[in-house]
Image: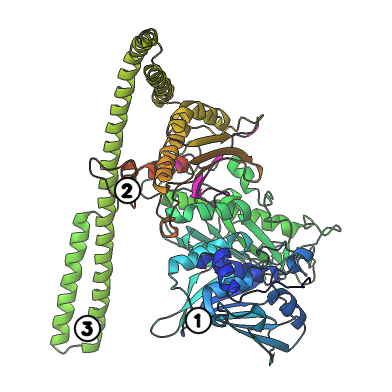
Amino acid sequence: MNETLYFATDAAIISRLGRELVARQETALIELVKNSFDADATHVTVRFTEDGALEIEDNGVGMSRAVLIDSFLRLASDFKVQSPFSPHFKRRRAGRKGIGRFATQRLGDVLVLRTTPEGSSAGLMLTVDWTKFTSGRDLGSVDVTLSPIDSETQGTTLRIEELSDEWTDAQIRRCWRGVLALQQPFPVAKIESNPAVDPGFSVEFRRADEFFGDENTVADFKTEILDHLHAVIELSVSDDGFAKWRISANRFGESRPWMKVHHDHLDSSTPPPYKHLKSAAMKTHYVILSPDLLPSLVYARVRDVLADQGGVRLYRNGFRVVPYGDAGNDWLRLDEIYSKRAILAPIANRNFFGVIEVTDVEGRLFEEHTSREGLIETPAFIELRSLASAVLVSAATRIAEDRGRKTRAGASRPRLERAPSADALHDLDAALKATQDAAIKAAANGAGHDAAEAVVAQVREATRILEEKKEEIATAEARLADEAAMLRFLATLGMTTAEFSHETGMTFDAFRLDFQAVFEMAKLASHGDAQLLAQSERASSMLARLDTLTSYLNTLAAARTARGMRPISLARALHEFHLGVVSQARAQGVELIVEIPPYDPLFTTPMHEAEIASILLNLYTNAVKAIKRANGERKILVKADRISDETAVRIQFFDSGDGILDSNLDRVFDAFFTTRTSAPAGSSDVEHAKGTGLGLWIVHQIVENSSGRIFASSPADNFSTCFDLRFPSEPDL
């Protein structure tokens, strides 16, 4: 007799799926923020509360009872498949389908979800105790609680209690960077030509102070991007048309106070007002995109953001006006001015990051085109564009002077005051101590006790700051000494390598001919001895591999002597790399795969010829070491392609080694950083597969000095590590 049976689901599947789908706590939190993006939220606040909980609060559309039950409480729901775009702003959904509930389980034992749908004051609260989902219980028998609540705020708040992991500030910042591509840093306002367009998305991570409970910002757009930029430039036009500007922050010198704008070319202390332009203001951040002027962990992030969103956007009456400030829009003609190279200070759109706001309630000064795409070039608009452009160029020029750089073609470089020497610091230290002693004596004599104590406090604070500066200088001097020693070491190593390559090149041909003769003699003398013949053929094969690799290294060594720079074809470089090392890789049981486009040479901007080969060899040797340590599948994949959106060419280097720990991702490019120690003589190959910590630092320096960038990205399937290298592509002629 046939029986009808049904599948049963153990409640422990929640925990198993949670750990399987969301292995890292950062990934779990990023997925929850992405869910807020999918819910058309414009702002998300992530809080690590005083009582040890985690809260994710958004102002999105919220969830109705039906949506909550059908999407959140139903495993394998196809809700996001059926609705791939968000309801209002038509955002393509960023969250991974169905992972949200598992993300909350991964982060903590208890979930309290409060949600209020759009246009309603009746909210819902869902409470889930994940510890109830234990092995041996049927999934359908574990209860969760849903109850109505009153709420005046639309959106959703997830509160996760009894957290599974500790959270460091570094992990929190990585989460913020994980959703950077979704964020819109400019003021959230409807866009005038299309009010239904997405107003933007921002995320703020906050943590309660350990002692006082006050919330402090750990990561937001200001702390992660704006605080690292070099200057702030402001412009103000009064209701009467009088204009003034200033540099309110300047990392390279003194700030500039408000200065009147002389736009009439007359030498007067009180310039006249603008004839048409009224009630306008500008605030823009300025940055010089150089790896030497930004922290190494910040440079790539700032560069990527400004490449996509750099420039100055225009707002009228609180509404953004497109296309001003969009990628590729040069309404202030900054790119045009910089391309002519009459002004040498960096003044392209990618160097600025800000907004201009104008007030024109009646719409008489700034009129829109009938197509609602941009503004008519009225006299007020022309004056605004000319003024803003002049202020930005003037400010950038003054900042360049503060840096001691030439500002115009043919101009001489301005002189800078020397930095305080050790003697000057000593004199300042002595003066501070003398002042402190005098203030203490005055206080002891009873004359002006309170005033003297205030002076003492100020001097002590100044002394503390002085000690900090002295420590910073000592640290910088030690770092420079280390770098100088490192450069001497690398130069010596390069000379030794070049000499060795030269000597082997002179003797290898003769050696190969002699060995070939020995091999032929061995074949004749074998008389059917299969073992002798096999050993001879194996030795000949190994010699051929050595010959190929040595030839590649000799070519590389010869290329290092070339001083000139020229565009490099990544396709050719990868082809030659593959020919040079594939035999050596095969001998170690490593499958080396190189993929390049069939008809695209992938030219970079001018570089030294040997640099790409140096990078590939370094990544290859590191990958082989990692593969040996992993003791698993031995596979390396190197791909090259073009990223048209970034006008860049790219190399992706994958390996199946033991990977990089999350805690080391931010440090792998630091000089001398390694997680390994040297192995003693006689150790195994695995133990000798160690690094000195210089290789990736050198690779990083080469890439950054070529105006490129390198970072560890998510590897493809069946690989554990991926290094992503991007170089500016040679522009079409």
Q: Which residue matches tag 1?
A: 53
Q: Quadrant of the N terminus?
A: bottom right
**Secondary structure state at the residue bearing disc 2:** loop
- Give the distance between the C-alpha atoms of the residues marked 2 and 1, in whole angstroms: 38 Å
Dot 2 alpha-carbon crowd within 10 angstroms: few under 14, some 14 to 19, many 20 or more: some
The magenta-colored residue range is: 705-733
How many numbered badges does the structure rendering display? 3
Dot 3 alpha-carbon crowd within 10 angstroms: few under 14, some 14 to 19, many 20 or more: many
Mark in the foreground, 1 or 3:
1
Amino acid type of disc 3? Ala
Which residue is painted at 48% across and 68% down in the image?
172
Dot 1 alpha-carbon crowd within 10 angstroms: few under 14, some 14 to 19, many 20 or more: some
Q: Is residue 249 above or below residue 127?
A: above
Coordinates of residue 97 in the picture (x, y in percent): 68, 65
- Give the distance between the C-alpha atoms of the residues marked 1 and 3, in whole angstroms: 47 Å
N-term mark: 2 or 1: 1
Q: Which residue matches tag 2?
A: 672
